[in-house]
Image (tube, grey):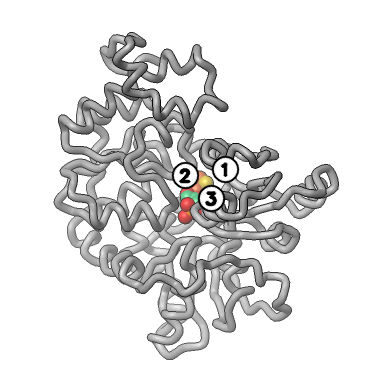
Amino acid sequence: MAADGFQFAFTPEVQAATAPAWEKVKRHITPMEWRGQAPLIAEINRLKREKDAVILAHNYMTPEIFHGVGDYVGDSLGLAKEAAKSQAKVIVQAGVHFMAETSKVLSPEKTVLIPDLRAGCSLASSITAADVRLIKQRYPGLPVVTYVNTSAEVKAETDICCTSANAVQVVEAAARQWGVERVILIPDEFLARNVARQTDVGIIAWKGRCEVHERFTAADIVELKAAYPDAEVLAHPECPAEVLEVADFAGSTAAMNDYVLRRRPKRVVLITECSMADNVAADAHETEFVRPCNLCPHMKRITLENIYDALLHGRHEVTVDPAISERARLAVQRMVDLPPPAKPARYDLIKARHHVDVELI
Ligand code: 13P
Ligand code: SF4
């Protein structure tokens, strides 16, 4: 699909301007594809300067977006922190709608654009603000910890947000601060169960699921390990607990990235969204990636073409009602202001615990 009115020409200037990105992606993109993508990448990068815009790109973006136009790339926590401190006038969120809303909540004075308004999330759509109000009535006095993969309305009903990178730390901080032994951690049932294996704090969970990670099974991992005995298996904590039990390591997308770049395994399997392996592989040439991936249809709605259109036409602007935004900001800001954990959440002690106290609402 051609972007609005854009003339594609792979000129020597375009080739030179996009050469660093090409170095990163050339193992995953053919020269023929690149000749189509490079002019758009060069033009997006020019438009960013003209409009004083930055592109915040999640680790699940395709490599031409991630390496070609992303100014800041990372996991949900990293993107939220960047949104809070960015000086640019415009933020283009190369990710899903809840991420764009989080950016708007943290930077209400900035224009926040999402290239496709349909880029949703099965976790975010699993729960409403009315659901959270009912949960609070049922468990008065318990703090509500909400995964960032939720709408601004849900965040507004929340005491503190968390991401997969800091969920254990946030749950323990909330229990300490409220002086309670149990907290409400919503809406991802699997994240809640995986956090419960890392802490003595009791967890009350909701039945939301990530449609990408819930599809992986322990049997898939056992089969992969039999086929590739030397492969290290890294899984995202949105996967079922049985998957994490047979994996070698679990962590957020940023933690998986760090694991590969620091430890340089000979062979690795990333149990997560498809583009993650392509993006990490660009900086880990000596590692072989086995790729049993599941696509996130929401993340894949974001393309170079609609990023270009977003910048050119200022669409689609994400707005949040100021009253909702004010309350949601408190919950997100409490998370952003937490001191960095002594150790990143790794979930790799998961096999050590026997008692897991989770009440499912
Ligand atoms: P993280 O990048 O925070 O690990 O989250 C993964 C995810 O599913 C975002 O939608
Ligand atoms: Fe939502 Fe899962 Fe897609 Fe992330 S990968 S946006 S949690 S559906």
Q: Marks 2 and 3: in contact by CB < 8 Å?
A: yes
Some atom of ligand 2 lies within 8 Å of the CB belonging to the residue at label 1: yes
Q: Nearer the viewer, mark 3 or mark 2?
A: 3
Q: Ligand 1 near label 2 (Cβ, under 8 Å)?
A: yes
Q: Residue drawn 36% across and 38% down?
A: 70
Q: Quadrant of the N terminus?
A: top left
Relative to residue 354, is residue 318 depicted above or below?
above
The residue that mark 3 highlights is 257
Q: Residues within 10 Å of mark 1 (few under 14, many from 20)?
A: many
Q: Is 324 drawn above or below residue 228 in the view shown?
A: below
Farthest bottom residue in view: 179
Disc 2 designates what residue? 59
In the picture shown, does residue 252 fall above or below 303? below
| C-alpha gap between disc 3 and disc 2 | 9 Å
- Residue type, label 2: Asn
CA–CA distance in space, label 3 to label 1? 13 Å
Q: Residue at x 72, y 71 (%)?
A: 351
> Tags 3 and 1 in contact by the CB under 8 Å rule?
no
Q: Nearer the viewer, residue 109 or 159?
A: 109
Q: Where is residue 134 drawn, in percent x and y?
A: 42, 71
The residue singled out by tag 1 in the image is: 273
For badge 1, the amino acid type reads Glu
Q: Quadrant of the C terminus?
A: bottom right
